[in-house]
Image (spheres, rainbow, N blue to C red):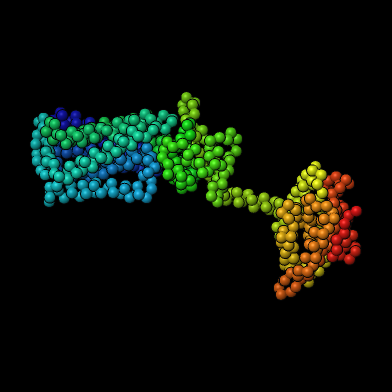
Amino acid sequence: MNDIIRILSIYLFVGVLQAAFLAAYAVTKGNTRVNRIFAALSGQIAIFLFGYVLELNSTTLEQMIFWNQVQLLPLPFYPAFWLFLAIAYTDRRGWRNKTARAVRWLIFVVPVLSFLIRLTNDYHHLYYSTMTLGRTAGFPVMLLGKGPWYYVNWIYVSICLVLATYFYLRRQPIPGGTKNGQYLMLVSSIIPYLGMILILTNPFNCGLDFAALLLPISVSICMVALFRYDFLAVRSLARDIVFENSHDAMILIDARHQLKDSNNNARVLLPEIGRHGHGDQIEMILRDRPELLSIVKNEPTSARPTQVQINDSYYEVEMTSIQTRTGQKAGTLVSLSDVTDRRIFQEKLKTLATRDGLTGLNNRAHFLELAELARAQAAGNGQPATLFMFDIDHFKVVNDTYGHAAGDLVLKTLGEKMRSFFRISDILGRLGGEEFAVFLQGASLAHAQLIIERFREAVARTPIIFDGHEVNITLSLGAAEMGPLTKDLDELLKLADKALYQAKRDGRNCLRLAP
């Protein structure tokens, strides 16, 4: 075997092993977008280089044509995947909408056509015009005449490689040490392009595939980026799993409050982010959301996340400071978690803890708490206040006659009547059973007497319909005004309760006032 062929074969076979290893390694690192593309790209390179090694070691034209065909199985698709890797790594958000997905499919049109045209080249010679056997440095090589579609494919490959280089150049490296890995990937993307130029110009007319000869160097640079600068382990996993695939809306801003990145959930929740580009000031982007903007700019120091309402939902805003290796602040990651269901559940728990389940009024504990606060405030401001209590007359008879369902309807209807009759500022409560209380703020006893009497009469003249029967109820009421003798709510309750029992002794369906 020619020494040159032996050296080239060993060199290329090392590239095959490297590319195969990279493909397997990328698969083991996780099922992320970057990993999948990187694995597919490395596998294609391995097959291409393996085919070229066997082509170089072939002695007949038929063997060379066969192994050249093997090389062309993955080769047309290699530039598209290289471009997709650059896009995925630099995360160009414009490539994640519906239009971009359609463009990604269009990128495969030329590779598919190139594959089919090369497969059927013997019938039309559009890809290779001629395929002849020659010799270079004493060993046989296949000399290929370039057909018209070869130049079309060359232009396509060049565009993909230039675009990949553009994406790597334009992307501003994120803090944390990945910029060196990004620069290596940039160099790695330029090397195959140089090989394509050498193939087109064919300066030595030697029949060698310069792109294949340079690919092992490109693969070696990828390995340095992978293992020295954690190309897949940190960047792709953090970006694809933690960031883009997060259920939360996530926004990355730098130390100057400029938008640097956002995931799809953030752009759906806040469409204004999608209308602005990376580098725009967050003040301009969120100018119509002052509450959220204030939280983002001020960065609450409390460890407890802040909640904000966006549209009809509630979101918990959590701020995570991002620092460089030297400890300098590089930016802030803003996470917005949808806590609407949790908030609704908390509100339900709060309602259960403070509301009577049947009437919807304050339960006894919450009524006493609110009434005491109102009493203390009225006493401090020198304002009048009156508390009255009442029972439903002969409520047991209602239950015994019509059943407990009728009794529940009476209590529920009475609660609705109270909410519609009294002011929002008045405090309403069910103390237990058929016993209720109302704290009238700003009402003297004389004024309260008129209100209470109207309420008693309204209840007495409005029957409740249950199962086709009219259920008539009346109330016995006792009222007491806050005064010098009522130092706290308990004293006021005792006075009102004493007046209530006097109303019962006086024949019910009446109001009695505490002295």
User: Does residue 38 appear anywhere in the picture?
Assistant: no
Q: Quadrant of the N terminus?
A: top left
Q: Closest to the observer: 31 or 76? A: 76
Q: Is residue 74 above or below residue 397?
A: above
Q: Is residue 21 left or right of residue 57?
A: right
Residue 228, image x, y percentages: 37, 29
Q: How many marks?
A: 0
Pick the residue in front: 145 or 513: 513
Q: Which x, y percent locates residue 63?
A: 14, 42
Residue occupying image coordinates x 84% and y 49%: 482
Where does residue 276 sit, x and y in percent of width and height?
42, 41
Quarter occupied by residue 468: bottom right
Residue 374 or residue 226, whichever sits in front = 374
**Residue occupying image coordinates x 17% and y 35%:** 199
In the displayed structure, 438 sits above or below 317; it is: below
Q: Name the residue furthest top.
A: 326
Where residue 418 sits: x, y (%)? 74, 60
> Is 55 on the left-hand or right-hand side of 307?
left
The quarter holding residue 192 reads top left
Figure quadrant of residue 95: top left
- The residue shown at (58%, 43%) is 307
**Between 254 and 453, which is closer to the camera in this rendering?**
453
